[in-house]
Image (tube, rainbow, N blue to C red):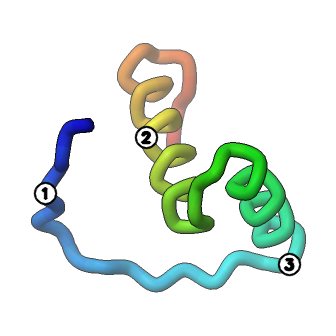
């Protein structure tokens, strides 16, 4: 698996209860941590935005 070095700042995000439950449930199903699930979702959003499937405003 490829290692990616991150040169950005660490951000702090406190999800609301519903979002945290969603992240925890899906992280458990996919054997990821909650942070890993957030990283996965953000990567998918970035890919979709690059393809024009999603417009982030």
Q: Nearer the viewer, mark 3 or mark 1?
A: 1
Residue 28: % across, % down: 74, 56
Mark 2 or mark 1: name the one nearer the start of the chain: 1
Give the residue pinned by disc 1. 5
10 Å crowding of disc 2: few (<14), some (14-19), many (20+) = few
Give the residue pinned by disc 3. 17
Give the residue pinned by disc 2. 43
Image height of 39 relative to 51, above or below: below
Residue 19: % across, % down: 79, 66
Closer to us: 32 or 57:
32
Residue at position x 70%, y 76% from top? 15
Residue 14: % across, % down: 63, 84
Closer to us: 51 or 39:
39
Query: Does residue 57 appear in this view?
Result: no
Q: Secondary structure at mark 2?
A: helix
Gap in angstroms between the C-alphas marked 3 and 1: 30 Å
Mark 3 or mark 1: name the one nearer the start of the chain: 1
- 10 left or right of 37 in image: left
């Amino acid at each position: 698996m490829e290692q990616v070095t991150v040169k950005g700042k660490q951000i702090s995000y406190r999800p609301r209860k519903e979002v945290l439950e969603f992240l925890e449930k899906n992280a458990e199903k996919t054997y990821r941590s909650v942070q890993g699930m957030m990283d996965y979702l953000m990567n998918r959003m970035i890919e979709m935005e690059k393809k024009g499937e999603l417009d982030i405003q």
